[in-house]
Image (spheres, helix red, strand yellow):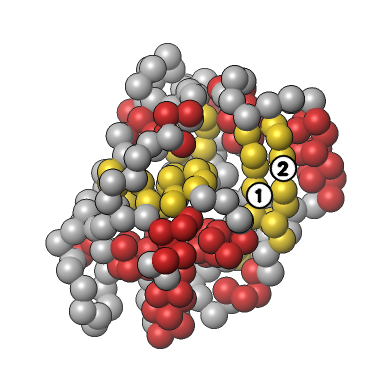
Amino acid sequence: VSLYSLVLSNCNCDIYIYILDGGLGESLKDDLKWFSEQNENIKKIDFIVIAQEMFSKFNSVRSLTNSDAHDEQSYMMYARLLMPSLIDVERVIYLDSDILVVGSLKDLYNLEITTGSIAARTCPYVKFLEHDWKLPYSCSKKVDYFNSGVMLVDLEKWRAEKIAEQCFELLNDYPNSFHMWDQSVLNVVINGDYTHLPPGYNQWPDVWCVGDESTSIVHFVGRPKPWALDEVVKESELL
C-alpha cells in the first residue's frame, strides 16, 4: 500500500527504493518486483536483508503485519539505524511501512537540512525528550522530540557524527529501557539537533482531510493500518 501510494503520487520523479527486509516472503518480493517493472519511474528496487536476531537483546514490538500472530515480536524498527552502512547514497527519505503518500515528495527530498543530520517532524503527542527518556543519563531533556517514522536523512552527516554507533552503545548499555525503541534512542543521541519538518510531511490521520494539498504523507501510527483498507474506511472514513 505504501509503495503503491508513493509511486502513484510521484509519477514525474525517478524513484530509487531500498526496502529493509526482515523476512519478507518470496511471493511478496516477486509481487513488488513485478510492480516496479510496470512503473518506468521506479529506477531501482533493492531488498536489503536484515537479520533481526542482531537486535534481539533490545525491546521488541508486537508484530502488526499478521492479525493471527498477536504474540509475534518484531525488531525491525532498529534496522533504520543501519541505513548509513547499508545504502551508499548521500541522502534518503526514510518511510515507515504504515504511511500513505498523498502528494509529491520532490520538495522534501530537496529540502535543505540546516540543523543536524536529519529533518523530521516534532511529535505532537510526545513534545519533549523528558516525556520519554527515563534513564539516569546526562542529557538535555527539555528539547523537542521527533517522530522517526518519516525522516529526511543526510547519510554523510549521520556517518560523520557516528549517530548509529552512539545509538547502539546506549542500546547495549540500557537494552530494555527505551520505551519507543529506536525513536527513543535516536532522540537521546540527536538531542534536539534536527531540522523541523512541516506537519504535512508526517501528518496524523485524525487531522488529515482528503484533498488537503498541504499534506504529502499520512502516518497511521497505532491502528488502523493502511494495508487494512476496509478497516481504515470503516473506522476512520478517510478513504
Q: Quadrant of residue 213?
A: top left
Within 10 Å of the Cα at label 2, are there few (<14), some (14-19), or many (20+) other Cα atoms?
some
The reply to whether residue 149 is visible in this rendering is: no
Residue topped by disc 2: 45
Residue topped by disc 1: 19
The x, y position of residue 31, in whole percent, is 81, 37
Name the kind of residue labelled 2 in the image: Ile
Q: Tell whether 34 sits left or right of 232.
A: right
Which residue extends farthest bottom? 173
Q: Are marks 1 and 2 in contact (CB under 8 Å)?
A: yes
Q: Tell whether 205 sits left or right of 41.
A: left
Q: Residue at x 65, y 74 (%)?
A: 53
Within 10 Å of the Cα at label 1, are there few (<14), some (14-19), or many (20+) other Cα atoms?
some
Q: Tell whether 132 sits left or right of 79.
A: left
Split into 4 quadrants, where in the image is the N terminus? top right
Q: Residue at x 43, y 17 (%)?
A: 210
Mark 1 lies on a secondary structure that is: strand
Q: Tell whether 14 sits left or right of 196.
A: right
The reply to whether residue 15 is visible in this rendering is: yes
Q: Quadrant of residue 85?
A: bottom right
Mark 2 lies on a secondary structure that is: strand
Viewer-closest of 18 and 69: 18
The x, y position of residue 131, in whole percent, is 22, 61
Which residue extends farthest top? 211
Viewer-closest of 66 and 37: 37
> Does label 1 or label 2 sit earlier along the sequence?
1
Q: Residue at x 42, y 29 (%)?
A: 107
Q: Is residue 98 above or below residue 232?
A: below
Q: Is residue 66 above or below residue 203?
A: below
